[in-house]
Structures are given as C-alpha cells and as structure tokens.
Amino acid sequence: MGEDVLKVLFTIPIGKGIPVRVAVVEMWVVMLFLIGLAFYLTSNMKLVPTKKQMIAEFIVDSMNKITKNFLGHYWRIFSPYLGTLFLFLLSLNLLGLFGIHPPTSNLNVTASFGVMSILILIVSTIILKNPVGWFLSHFKPVIIIFPFKFLDYFTRTLSLSARLFGNILAGTTIMELIYHALIKSHIPPVGIPAIASLYFDIFDGVLQAIVFTFLSLIYLYEALEE
C-alpha cells in the first residue's frame, strides 16, 4: 500500500550512497509534467488569447481571486505558492488512475507537505509582521494562551498531513480490494472498477487537493489577521 512508494528504486553513488525512492521519482515526473504543461500553455501568448492561453489564464485568475478574497493585499505573495501546491497535489493524487500508488498514500510524504505549509506560514508572518509583532501575537487575547498557540503549529501540521494521507490511502486500498475481489470471483475487472474510480481516484483526489490547499489558505489568513 503506502509503503510501496517508499521502496528504493536506485541509489545515487555519492558518499555512502543516496537512496532514491519510488515516491521521489514519481514526484519528479509530476514536476516535469507540470513544468512542461506550463511552458506549453504560456508559449506564444497573444492579446487575443488562444484556447490554451485561456486555460492558463483561467487557472491563474481563479487562484488569484480566491487568494485575494482571503488575504487582501498579501495575495500576490501567496497565490503562486497556493496555486502550485494545488496543482502538484492534484496531479499526485490522480496517479491512481494510471495504476500507480500515489505518493500521498504514505504519511511521510504528506507530512512533508504539512511541514512545508506551516513553515511558510511561520516564516512569512515573521517577515510581514516583524519578529517582535509575530512573537507578541501569541499572547493574544490573553497571556495564558501562549503555550497553546505554539502547540497549534504542531496540531495543524498533523491535521494537514493525516487528513490527506488517510483519505488517499483509503481510496487506494478500496480500489485494490475491488480489483482483488473481482479477480478471485473470476469477474472481468471492468465496469465496477471504472465506476468506483470516479469517486475514489478522481473525486476524492480532487477534493483532498482542494481541502489541503484551502486549509493552508485559511491558516495563512488567521495568522496574518492576528
């Protein structure tokens, strides 16, 4: 299941050797795909947009509007990150459609995304509020809440990581059980898996990418408003 994406695929011969796992290679492939897609959609841009340019503009404008509604004048800082985060998670989650275990079906992978989002939140609020203002915000509305404010960083990281991991792993597991049940029953694995895939691979994959990105946005909004 989720352990499959952590198998060592090959080792880079540097020092004692750097193991490169399946999940890392999958993420490299997805990154190359998204970079290539971005170059394709934005090449030869014109005043009268072509169909591919309209797709690119729709994606960027949609993310900008959502971010602007929540973060106000800070939207320019965070919109590129949140848009990239959504597209990256969406692509990873949808790998199940190709019979590949999504990297997000392993807690180690989702935890890295959770830590990344919370670190960006902390660093950006320190810079935007200045270190003193950021530190003092942890004593509001009452001083006694101070330790809980710092504990909140951990709980939010855990919440982001566990929710994404649990839902993607559950969907992947259910799809495998359906395939195995059909094969053991000597039923051709067509029809039922396709219908189940609409929910467990597509709908759930899209939903979890939206939820993770939206929660990251909400956490940024709350931190900047304090």
Image: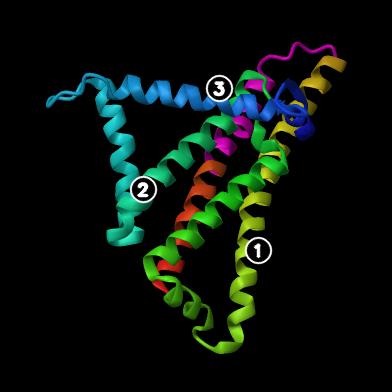
Q: Which residue is mark 1?
A: 155
Q: To which residue does mark 3 refer? A: 29
Taking the magenta stretch, the answer to whether it contains residue 187 is yes
Q: Which one is in front, 35 or 162?
A: 35
Percent coordinates x, y for residue 66 in the rendering: 34, 51
Stretch in magenta: 185-207
The percent coordinates of residue 175 (x first, y second) are 72, 28
Precedes in sequence: disc 2 or disc 3 = 3
**SS of the residue under disc 3:** helix
Q: Label 3 sits on what residue type?
A: Val
Q: Give the color scheme: rainbow, by chain, secondary structure or one colour.
A: rainbow
How far apart marks 2 and 3 lie (CA) works out to 23 Å
Mark 3 or 1 closer to N-term? 3
Q: List x then y, in percent, for residue 222.
A: 45, 67
Instruction: Give the alpha-carbon distance from disc 3 to disc 1, as whole Å.
Output: 31 Å
Q: Is residue 127 above or below residue 170?
A: below
Q: Write the residue at 46% across / 35% down.
A: 87
| Residue identifier under label 2 | 79
Q: Residue at x 58, y 29 (%)?
A: 27
Task: Name the one closer to the observer, 155 or 190.
Answer: 155
Image quadrant occupied by the C terminus: bottom left
Classify 10 Å Cα crowding around label 3: few (below 14), some (14-19), many (20 and above): few
Q: Is residue 41 magenta?
A: no
In depth, the one of 75 and 16 nearer the eye is 16
